[in-house]
Amino acid sequence: MAPDARVGKLWIGTNWKMHKTLAEGQAYCSELMRVAENLHPDIELFVIPPHTHLHALKTLMARSRVRLGAQNMHWEDEGPYTGEISPRMLAEIGLDLIELGHSERRQYYNENDADINRKVHAALSHNLRPLVCVGETAEQRKFGITEEVLAIQLKIGLSGLSREQAEQVLIAYEPVWAIGAGGVAAEPGYVEDVHGCIRRLLAALFGESGHRIPILYGGSVSESNFETYLDRRNVNGLFIGRAAWDIGRFSRMLLAVHRRMSA
Ligand code: PEP
């Protein structure tokens, strides 16, 4: 199994959401670095912990291939925004990625596509790669408007980017009905269809550059189903929540991917 030639790598990572103390995170990342040492070079591995852990984990993983990201940020460099973290602050830590537009941010904190677009531009101006989450709700799927919803999220979220900037973006397709404790994993065939639709949209927006943007699938990915997504067209990686929070389970999945890529 080889990654899509135009995308080049297979991206696999996890967002811890609001889980793990710093000590738990350090133990997790120490083990992850050890596992990462022997993984196939075409696997791009990343972890997205809570903000309070980022500085210490960056120090711990300074020489590791594991990429580090944050779960959210404001678009301004500084200002009267109590409780917020700025791109300048995150860039100073030396992060690689910034996750933007997770459905929990959209649902509980009223983030909209225009906000996400401001954040995408702010991230790029600080050399942070935006990992933009998109996905339809169960109701939108029921009404058959998944494609329209994704088009709105992508057209607004990525508005104003040059082709060169677009190549720095990663997309995570995370159907809202598939993620979290009450979620149901999407069928691999459905994921392939939707990723195909996202790819066409990206190509329409950014030409050949749209083919170089990794599209990751996320939503109830587990140790028993993760391999079913990997051979599907335009699935350029996996964004895993709960199933990756246990380092033993995540390591087993990574080693299985490594074996498939090395075969
Ligand atoms: C998520 O919430 O982004 C996610 C992928 O969660 P899970 O894998 O736990 O469904």
Image (spheres, rainbow, N blue to C red):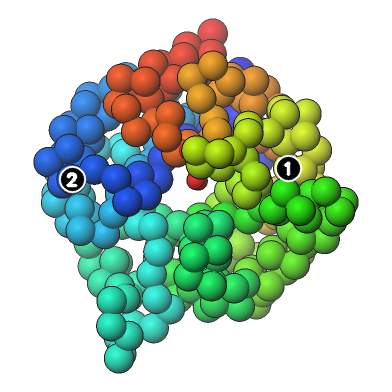
Residue located beneath label 1 in the image: 195
Residue furthest toward the front?
182
Kind of residue sitting beneath label 2:
Thr
Q: Residues within 10 Å of mark 2 (few under 14, many from 20)?
A: few
Label 1 or label 2, whichever lies nearer to me, is: 2
Kind of residue sitting beneath label 1:
His
Mark 1 or mark 2, earlier in chain: 2
Residue located beneath label 2 in the image: 21
Q: Position of residue 161 (x, y in %)?
A: 62, 72
Depicted 94 relative to depicted 38: above or below? below
Quadrant (top left, top right, bottom left, bottom right) of the C terminus: top right
Residue at 51% over, 41% down = 180
Tell me the quarter of the picture where residue 217 sits: top right
Q: Position of residue 114 (x, y in %)?
A: 61, 78
The reply to whether residue 53 is in sight is yes
Q: Position of residue 14 (x, y in %)?
A: 41, 40
